[in-house]
Amino acid sequence: MSRYKTDNKQPRFRYSVLARCVAWANISVQVLFPLAVTFTPVMAARAQHAVQPRLSMENTTVTANNNVEKNVASLAANAGTFLSSQPDSDATRNFITGMATAKANQEIQEWLGKYGTARVKLNVDKNFSLIEDSSLEMLYPIYDTPTNMLFTQGAIHRTDDRTQSNIGFGWRHFSENDWMAGVNTFIDHDLSRSHTRIGVGAEYWRDYLKLSANGYIRASGWKKSPDVEDYQERPANGWDIRAEGYLPAWPQLGASLMYEQYYGDEVGLFGKDKRQKDPHAITAEVNYTPVPLLTLSARA
């Protein structure tokens, strides 16, 4: 309590000067010394195995000079807006954390993009610890021709206070008639609870339609449950079917449908407090994208 009382008694002018100094120092560091972070890509036991779209190596390269110029302009604009509001120390800390995280996401994705297709979403708290909905995914083509691609993909996710990963291999065939078909197999591992399962999937894509099916087989046994007292838990066997598409005449309107089925006496498909025998679920979603970067969706 005394620390907060002391902070409250300090003049606001001192916060303003501190905010300006720290913000401009942060900008200088980001411009002069771009972040270089190395990750070992590995993905989520509950992820949907949504393999990333095919991208050539040319599509993932980025011009460094253009990025530096854009970053300088963006950082300067954000700092100007922020400093004009005369922020306090907490706001300054959050601002710096947000800018550093955004920069790290960009640098990591561009670096990984030199080797394959990457998608990075790192969220951190004020202590720079990873928090919910953080993820890193990487697809690397082992063999790539105009009609066939053999690839490996790995990822790591932070969801529901659990860190989950997967890694696997897949093959895709690209037809001259604008369709793609493929198969894949993955090993999913829950790093927080040491659960493992094996996944096998198939997919079929057209210009306006995506179909996929996955089967899941547990590869680890019973372990003490941290969620329910005097219970043990293990991965549930199951499968799912997914469909996603849009109207060719109206591409702004899209829809998706998923059916999933799992097997066991007390399966927590709907949460630890709603355990059921052999549960299943149907999930439908409609989305509308009137302009790029803006999507409205409804799920049931």
Image (tube, rainbow, N blue to C red):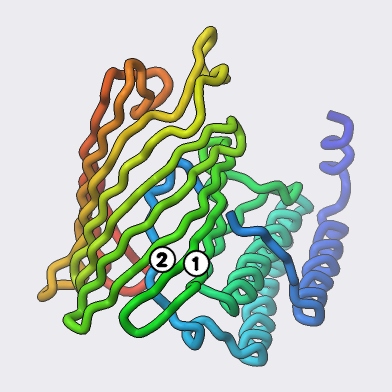
**Image quadrant containing the C terminus:** top left
Q: Residue furthest top?
A: 230
Image coordinates for residue 219, horizontal then vertical, percent: 47, 34
Is residue 229 toward the left or the right of residue 292 in the image?
right
Image coordinates for residue 214, horizontal then vertical, percent: 30, 47
- The local crowd at label 2, few if under 14, some if 14 to 19, many if 20 or more residues have their Cα within 10 Å, is few
How many numbered marks have been drawn onto this rendered protein structure? 2
**Residue annotated with mark 2:** 52
**Which amino acid is tagged 2?**
Gln
**Image quadrant containing the N terminus:** top right
Mark on residue 230? none
Cα distance, mark 2 to mark 1?
Answer: 7 Å
Is residue 175 toward the left or the right of residue 151 in the image?
left
Of the pair 225 and 149, the residue shown nearer to us = 149
**Which amino acid is tagged 1?**
Leu
Question: Which numbered disc, 2 or 1, marks the residue that appears first in the sequence?
Answer: 2
Is residue 272 toward the left or the right of residue 22 in the image?
left
Relative to 282, residue 241 above or below: below
Image coordinates for residue 120, horizontal then vertical, percent: 56, 63
Image coordinates for residue 92, horizontal then vertical, percent: 74, 58
Q: Residue at x 50, y 15 (%)?
A: 232
**Residue annotated with mark 1:** 139
Of the pair 262 and 181, the residue shown nearer to us = 181
Relative to 169, residue 43 above or below: above
Q: Is residue 117 visible?
A: no
Is residue 6 toward the left or the right of residue 53 in the image?
right
- The local crowd at label 1, few if under 14, some if 14 to 19, many if 20 or more residues have their Cα within 10 Å, is many
Tell me whether circle 2 and circle 1 mark residues in contact (CB < 8 Å): yes
